[in-house]
Image (cartoon, rainbow, N blue to C red):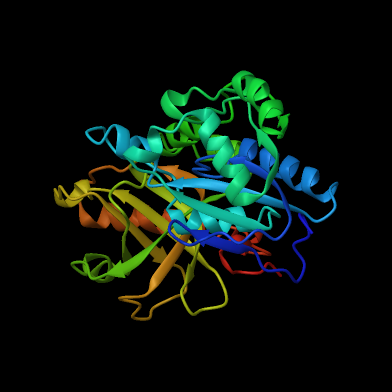
Amino acid sequence: MAGDTSARRVRVFREDESFVPAGGASVTVGRFDGMHRGHRALLRATCQVASDQRDGRAIAVTLWPPPEWVLRPAEPRQLLTTLDDRIALLASSGVDDIVVMRFDQQFSRRSAEDFLGDLKQQLNLRTLVTGPTAAIGRDREGTPKVIARLAPRLGIKHVPVRYEGSPGAISSTQARNALSSGEVDRLRAILGRSHSLYGMVSRGDGRGRKLGFPTANVELPEWLVLPADGVYAGAAFVDGDPEPYSALISVGTRPTFNSRTRLFEVHLLGFDRDIYGRGLRTFIHAWLRVQEAFDSVEALVAAMRRDRQAAECVDLAGMSDAAPFGRAPE
C-alpha cells in the first residue's frame, strides 16, 4: 500500500489521538521542517521498505511542538512550515500514516532505547529508517550508530539512508538561510519545489489600492521564516477559488512611506475582489528587486509597473507544487 497515492487516504493521528496499528510498520522519525529533498529521500526509502513487506505500512512520525521550543524557549522560534503544512507535505510523500507526537519535558527525558521500545509497542514497529543526521532520545543520544546497536536487541531492523550531495548541503537550516536571504533559486534546489506560505488576509491601510495596486495584507505566524525584504514574482490561490493567480509579492517595511511595520503583501494580477478574512496560499517563484525608498510616489508606481510585467511571466500551467495543499495540477 505504501507509496501508492491513487485513491487512498492517509491516516493522521495528532498528538493525543491513539494510534491504531493496521500492519507492520516501517517508520521514520523527524521534524520535517520544510520537507526538503533529503526528507523526501528518507520517506521514499520508508515507503519502499514497507512495500516489500507483507501488510507493511509506511509511517512518518513528527514531533510537535518542535523540541527546541520546549528545551530552549528563550531562543528565537523560526520554522519554514506550520504543522498543518508539514502534514500536507508528508501526506503527499506516499506514506500510509502520519503520527504527530506531543513533545514535552517528560518526552525529552526518554532514552533512545525507551523511545524505540515505545515505537515498537505503539506502532507495531518492524523497521526504522533513519537519515544521516538522525538523533533520537535524551540529549540526542540515538545517533545512527547507536540505533544500529540497539535495533537487534529490540527485534527491530534498522535501515540507514544517505542523502545525495555534500554533507549538510540539503537541510532545513540551509533552506531557512536561503529563504531569509532571498535566494529563491537555492531554496528551490534544496526543497525540490517552490516554497509557499499560507495566511489569512487582513485589512491594511488601503495604500496599495490608492496607487492602483490593491494588495492583500497576509497575516502569518510570527515564528514563520519570511523571505528577505524585497519584491518577488509568484503565484497565489485564494481559498474557495479553483485557479491560481499570478502574484506580485512585497516583503518589508515600505521604506518610501517611512513605515516600521514589516509586512507580507500580495498583489494578485487581474484580480480586484474583497478577500478580507479569507486564506491565501502564496508561492514564491522569483526574486525581482530589493525594497528601496523612492524619491516620489510616481517613481514607486513606475517600479511597481515594471515588477508587474515580470510577474506576468510566471507560468501557472499545472502548478504541481500546489497539489499537496489540495490543489490538483491540470
Q: Residue at x 58, y 43 (%)?
A: 119
Q: Which percent across, then down, holds residue 159?
A: 73, 31
Residue 321 figure quarter = bottom right
Q: Describe residue 11's horizontal placement relative to residue 246 as left or right.
A: right
Q: Which percent across, then down, holds residue 103?
A: 39, 44
Q: Which percent across, then down, holds residue 10?
A: 64, 64
- Pick the residue in front: 302 or 44: 44
Q: Residue at x 37, y 81 (%)?
A: 273
Q: Which percent across, then down, holds residue 107?
A: 40, 39
Please indicate, yes or no, whether residue 245 appears anywhere in the rendered image: yes
- Pick the residue in front: 192 or 305: 192
Residue 274, above or below 71: below
Q: Describe residue 118's horizontal placement relative to residue 306 as left or right.
A: right
Residue 125, above or below 220: above
Q: Quadrant of the N terminus?
A: bottom right
Q: Residue at x 40, y 55 (%)?
A: 249
- Pick the residue in front: 206 or 124: 124
